[in-house]
Image (cartoon, helix red, strand yellow):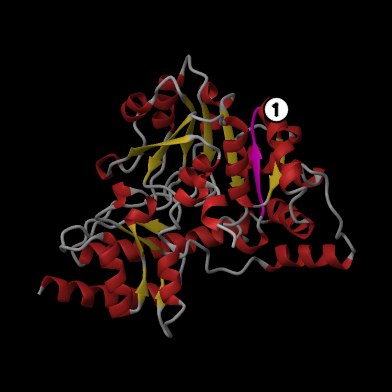
Amino acid sequence: MMDYDRIMSRNVKTLQPSGIRKFFDILDTMKDAISLGIGEPDFVTPWHIREAGVYSLEQGFTKYTSNAGLIRLREAVSGYLKRRFDIGYDPADIFITVGGSEAIDLCVRALIDPGDEVIIPVPSFVCYGPLVTMANGVPVYVETKAENEFKLTAQELRAAITPKTKLLVLPYPNNPTGGIMERRDLEDIASVLEGTDIMVLSDEIYAELTYGQKHVSPCNIPALYDRTMLVNGFSKAYAMTGWRLGYVCGPRAIMKQMLKIHQYGIMSAPTTSQYAAIEALRNGDADIETMRESYNKRRRLLLKGLRDMGLECFEPRGAFYMFPRIGDFGLTSDEFCTRFLQEERVAIIPGTAFGQGGEGYTRICYASSVENIETALERLRAFLERLRS
């Protein structure tokens, strides 16, 4: 009999399943439950973008593209980044990936040797640490704080750097906190990295979803441009999650190595999705504005509702998540969310799914309808009243 436990990768066996998945598994067994858990736009991909994908199929564009992606799409990405964020990249320094997640994985694998350390601010998206571990690197988690608006400070970064540090992840706008980095924050980070060979992986998938200010990328900071790998995609800004398309930009020498991994592991991103993405970048600015305005309305509604019932909550300035503090009820974050789902049929995610520093918090996604948010707030109020009684 095969001993599967013995032959499986030790690295992979040590990984914990996503803390988010548990709640979706429970949710799948319920009827009439509300999910404010999944980080996915509730919008359908705009019709003109879907139509471009359909048209590409009708025209028979069903073959592989180049490994780096359609040149027309890379040119469109280049124009989009310059138009929207004043970031300059030659199309040769851009390639198309299967979602932003593949781009993150490629960055890590192209840069990390066994034992290299990667600094990861937390709370943050669940994939960074496991990807580093699978690349035989060492995740170094830095707990950000609510009093600093969950930003990585220069002091926290400086304290985390060792001779083994190879890479810094900057996950802003942030999932799950909604925190952002402003220009002065990034300039402080640049001053800490000056004179080192530490690279920056900037995950900017929520760059279009900021409220009250424009997104600033590390690539907008001259001292960071040459050391930054910019990752973005189409899932959040254009409601294209199922199309699985992203991109990465960075120094050509590193991109060349990443492309080799992409060639062997993926070949090329989905052709139909690439044609749809060209249309999104060329004619989708108005769609972004419409969706962002709707998210902002929901953001204000949810924040007011949480504060009215006495929950302490940092005002998110990016993405579409809220991270209220629920640590005063005598329950762990996991217990709070589990009971809320079971008793009130509303799914939210414990803060610990995004790092141990998330204990005492929960993530609520407001990429859902106003009706769902209002109903969820009513149910949360009833739940809190029982906990307080």
Query: Looking at the picture, does residue 58 appear above or below residue 269?
Result: below
User: In which quadrant of the rendered image does the N terminus lie?
Assistant: bottom right
| Residue 65 part of the magenta segment | no
Kindly identify the residue that appears in the image at 77 percent across and 63 percent down.
53
| Residue 43, image x, y percentages | 56, 68
| Residue 142, image x, y percentages | 35, 37
**In the current view of this chain or complex, which residue is farthest to the top?**
195
Q: In this view of the protein, which residue sits in the foreground, 120 or 376? A: 120
Q: In this view of the protein, which residue sits in the foreground, 89 or 294? A: 89
**In the current view of this chain or complex, which residue is farthest to the left?**
389
Q: Is residue 180 left or right of residue 358?
A: right
Q: Is residue 322 left or right of residue 249?
A: left
Kindly identify the residue that appears in the image at 46 percent across and 65 percent down.
38
**In the current view of this chain or complex, which residue is farthest to the bottom?**
31
User: In which quadrant of the rendered image does the C terminus lie?
Assistant: bottom left
Query: Looking at the picture, does residue 311 appear above or below residue 184?
Result: below
Q: Which residue is mark 1?
A: 252
Query: Which amino acid lies under the numbered mark 1 shown in the image of this protein?
Result: Arg
| Residue 250 part of the magenta segment | yes
The segment highlighted magenta reads 245-251
Q: Tell me if residue 157 can be seen.
A: yes
| Residue 222, image x, y percentages | 54, 23
Q: Secondary structure at mark 1?
A: helix
